[in-house]
Image (cartoon, helix red, strand yellow):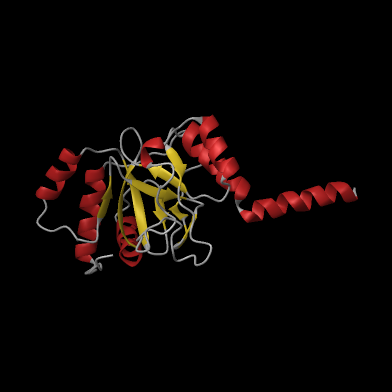
C-alpha cells in the first residue's frame, strides 16, 4: 500500500509540473483535431520575460517556433510524441492556415469587452485563446485575398487587430511562455472531433462593431 501511494504521489507531482498535460494536449491537437503543431522556444531560464532564442528584442518570448522552424509543423503522432517527450515543457505552437484554423487577435482588455458585447448579441464563437496580453479568436482558414477584400470594405479597422493566417502561428494552451501562461478563455467543447470555428468575416465584423459601439480605443500592442 505504501508503494502504491508513493507511485500515486509521483504521478500527481508530474501532473502538477504540467509535463504529461503538454504531451497529451499536443497529441490531441495533432492527431484528433488534425491541427499541425510544433514546439516553441522556451522562455530564457535566466529571466522568463526574455526568450530563449538569439533575438534580445523578441516580442513574443517563448511563444514562437525556432528550432525546428514553422514548416516542420505536423499532425504526425510519432513526431509530436517525440518532440514533447524530449522537450516536455516546450510551448505548443499551432501553424495557422492551410487546413488548420486561423486566428484574429487583439489586446486582452479590448478583447474582454468585445466578447462581453458579442455575448449580449448571442453570437456563436469558437475557441478563444488567452494570454496575459492578447486574446486570439480562432476562425476558419482564409486566404490573403479574402482577408484583403474584407478589410478593404471596412471604413475603420482597429490597428491593434492582428491576423494569423497562412504562414502564421499562435501558442496553444496549456503552454507557458515568457509573457505568462496560455489558457482557454472559451474552451473547445469536449469530444474527439475538431472544434467548430466561425468564418473570419463574421468575427471581424462583430469585433469591429463591438469595439466601436463600446468606445474601446485599443492600444497598438
- Extreme residue toward the right, this view: 1
- Extreme residue toward the front, this view: 54
Q: Nearer the viewer, residue 184 or 43?
A: 43
In the rendered view, does 208 fall on the left or right side of 190?
Answer: left
Quadrant location of the C terminus? bottom left
Residue at x-position 40% and y-position 43%: 94
Q: Nearer the viewer, residue 69 or 174?
A: 69
- Measured from the top left, where is residue 176 in percent x and y? 50, 57
Q: Is residue 132 visible?
A: yes
- Measured from the top left, where is residue 72 in percent x and y? 41, 36
Q: Nearer the viewer, residue 105 or 204?
A: 105
Report how many numbered discs are placed on residues in the image: 0
Residue at x-position 21% and y-position 37%: 143
- Measured from the top left, where is residue 146 in percent x and y? 17, 39
Q: Is residue 192 visible?
A: no
In the rendered view, does 46 fall on the left or right side of 194?
Answer: right
- Measured from the top left, where is residue 212 in percent x and y? 19, 64
Amino acid at each position: 500500500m505504501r508503494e502504491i501511494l508513493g507511485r500515486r504521489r509521483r504521478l500527481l507531482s508530474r501532473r502538477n509540473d504540467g509535463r504529461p498535460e503538454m504531451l497529451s494536449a499536443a497529441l490531441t491537437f495533432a492527431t484528433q483535431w488534425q491541427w499541425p503543431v510544433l514546439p516553441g522556444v522556451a522562455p530564457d531560464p535566466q529571466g522568463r520575460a526574455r526568450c530563449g532564442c538569439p533575438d534580445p528584442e523578441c516580442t513574443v518570448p517563448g511563444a514562437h517556433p525556432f528550432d525546428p522552424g514553422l514548416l516542420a509543423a505536423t499532425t504526425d503522432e510519432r513526431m509530436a510524441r517525440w518532440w514533447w517527450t524530449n522537450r516536455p515543457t516546450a510551448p505548443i505552437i499551432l501553424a495557422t492556415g492551410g487546413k488548420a484554423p486561423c486566428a484574429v487577435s487583439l489586446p486582452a482588455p479590448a478583447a474582454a469587452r468585445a466578447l462581453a458585447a458579442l455575448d449580449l448579441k448571442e453570437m456563436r464563437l469558437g475557441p478563444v485563446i488567452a494570454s496575459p496580453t492578447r486574446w486570439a479568436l480562432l476562425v476558419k482558414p482564409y486566404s490573403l485575398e479574402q482577408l484583403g477584400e474584407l478589410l478593404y470594405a471596412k471604413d475603420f479597422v482597429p490597428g491593434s487587430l492582428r491576423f494569423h493566417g497562412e504562414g502564421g502561428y499562435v501558442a496553444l494552451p496549456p503552454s507557458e511562455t515568457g509573457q505568462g501562461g496560455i489558457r482557454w478563455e472559451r474552451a473547445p467543447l469536449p469530444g474527439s472531433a475538431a472544434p467548430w470555428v466561425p468564418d473570419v468575416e463574421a468575427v471581424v465584423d462583430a469585433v469591429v462593431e463591438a469595439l466601436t459601439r463600446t468606445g474601446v480605443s485599443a492600444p497598438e500592442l
